[in-house]
Image (cartoon, helix red, strand yellow):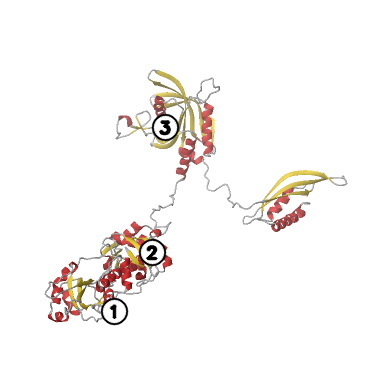
Amino acid sequence: MKFSWKLVQHFIEVNTNEFEDIQNQLNMSGIEVESINYRDDDIILDVSVTANRKEIDSALGLARELNIILDKKMFIEPISFVINKCRIHSDRKVKSNMFNYVRIHKIKITDYNSTPNWILDLLEIHNIKPQSIIENIQKYVKIKWGKTFYIIQHEKKKEISIPKELNDHKNFIVTTINNKIFFKQILNSKKEIIIVFADEKYMRINRSNYYKNYDFDENYYIDSLTIIKSFINQSIGKFYEYYSPYRILNSKIKLKQQNINKILGHVEKNTFKYINKGAIEEILKKLKFNNKYIKNKKLFLVEGPAYRRHDLIREIDIIEEISKIHGFKNFYGKCIYGSKQGKQSREFIELKKIKKTLRNLGFNEVINCSLTNNKNYSIKIHNPLNEEQKYLRDNITENLLRNYEYNLKYSSNNLLIFEVGTIFKQGVKPEEKRLLGGLIYANNYNRKDWQKKPENITRFQAKGILEAFLKKIEANVKLENIEGDITSRYGQKSAKARNVIGIYNEKDNVIIGTIKKLNYKYGIKSKRKEEEIYTFEIKLNQLIKTMKNRKHLEYIKKPYSEYPSIIRDLSIQVRKNGYVNKIIENIYKNKNKLVESIEIFNEYNKMTLDRSQQERFVGVRITYRSLHKTLNSNDIKNIDQEINEIINKTKNM
């Protein structure tokens, strides 16, 4: 579809230098500019329009769209239509809100009437073949306004030929033409024709009986008659009019503010701020929408202009128009989740640190059920799920040994595992405790020589692993041997725990855990052998209490300069028993921001010229640097002078 820029500028003024910006905004509105052809006195735009924007088929349609997206005022305003009061009364009886309006004129065309060149040029641009002057004007009006009048040619004693677009008004047109008064004025020659203007109008009437909308029906009607009168040199007489009222269903659309926010997203990048009610109303006003906001329901009742009634029929259609005008780039669709972190307890933070440290040392975490079938010293459950889970466990090592047995069936590799779990002790009152338990089995840990087989991990190596763990988590504990034999119970299997190492809280010397070597016998089918297994159990809450609770950093952040430094090496003479630190302290006390560091790098003695005594000298290296600039010769000269004054004052002290 082609548009004459000169014709568009009859309605709105747009600078041709803004074409690039105009093209981008038209593309967002479903109007793609495919090519631009520059002529001597005009610019022709070849435009592709999406199927739903069929109202953009004329210079007025394009100008009306530019008025919205560029926010530029149009030269013309819609002319109000004056309705016959008698007709209004009859329309109200049928409670109509729309009516078809038809006007009929007779025109006399003479032989010497010719079409002006500027109309012919415009028809040529649109590949329209010229015909008679009245038909050329008809096509020109269609190109300019998007609608035009109809032409009826009638000869005496012949049937009236009515265009199919006017079939709904055929009876009125035929009756009017056959009217005696009208008939006397018409058809005296073959050059007299009838033109018909047919429009749809909305029945919105105020106290002045004026129909007000954003349609340009009256404008195109007056413009058509003006052009016709200008080139046929004939006056145009009175017209005959016809009203045909009817009613359409409610065309108001409910537009919820919640749906606008949900679909379009927020308007600021890092906040949940949405487009506000005032901005929405301003955009609806630009789009020529009649709207009413219902506060308690937080929605708009919206009614679009007549020329957009074909494509704005749903809520989502209006939301899309709002996004086009506000600008798609001004919405942020990515969901922003709250970055605020909830409060984490000290126990939770320290437990994460414990688990991470054990994993870094090569341990794997296991999770076992707290239910067991071992009834010795265990608390019985009143409603067990099955016979094998009737009791609550009273130790954590039993489950770790089961993990070890299961692992040994499928692999003979080293096994280092730990578990954070709960145990239950029987007493006057049942007691629940959280323990950190672990198992170390490493039969291929030591190899003294490549010619010899690898050996099991030793007691001291197992102890070293636990010491490394406790040091990394900064636990204030100590490890000491517990004298004597301690018998441990792990289900129906028995094992003696010898050489037990106790883990003590260094502050109050209370034992919080143990490290044990188990001589554990197990059997797998016919194969039997004895392996060394080390286990440890630590009371978790007591362990966390021994860890350092750091509430502040042990370092201070300072800005780092990006500018180069200058180094000065000074030789300072001091007394034989004098302290050079006093000089350094006085330099620092001077608080010169350009002095970055002072370093003593040498000391030597030198004989005087008469060789009667020795003089003591100290080499000091001073680094100058600025945070904001590169130091020049004047800066360095001033610093040197200050430091020399300080040295002269303090070197004999």
Q: Which residue is mark 2?
A: 37
Q: Dot 1 surroundings within 10 Å: few (below 14), some, or many (20 or more)?
A: few
Nearer-N-terminus badge (1/2): 2
Q: Dot 3 surroundings within 10 Å: few (below 14), some, or many (20 or more)?
A: many
Instruction: Examine the image and state in which quarter residue 309 appears.
Output: bottom left
Tell me which amino acid carries mark 2.
Answer: Asn
Residue 635 to residue 98: above or below: above
**Residue 314 on image: x %, y %:** 27, 60
Q: Nearer the viewer, residue 148 or 168?
A: 148
Which marked residue is nearer to the observer: mark 2 or mark 3?
2
Q: Which residue is mark 1?
A: 230
Q: Nearer the viewer, residue 309 or 649?
A: 309
Q: Residue furthest top?
A: 526
Q: CA distance from mark 1 to mark 2?
A: 31 Å
Instruction: Examine the image and state in which quarter residue 425 appears.
Output: top left
Secondary structure type for disc 2: strand
The answer, for residue 249, to whether it is visible in the render is yes
**Residue 197 on image: x %, y %:** 22, 73
Q: CA distance from mark 2 to mark 3?
A: 86 Å
Q: Are marks 1 and 2 in contact (CB under 8 Å)?
A: no
Secondary structure type for disc 1: helix
Q: CA distance from mark 3 to mark 1?
A: 107 Å
Q: Which residue is mark 3?
A: 396
Residue 19 to residue 225: above or below: above
Residue 304 to residue 270: above or below: below
The answer, for residue 275, to whether it is visible in the render is no
Tell me which amino acid carries mark 3.
Answer: Ile
Residue visible at 53% across and 20% down in the picture: 452
Which marked residue is nearer to the observer: mark 3 or mark 1?
1
Q: Dot 2 surroundings within 10 Å: few (below 14), some, or many (20 or more)?
A: few
Tell me which amino acid carries mark 1.
Answer: Ser
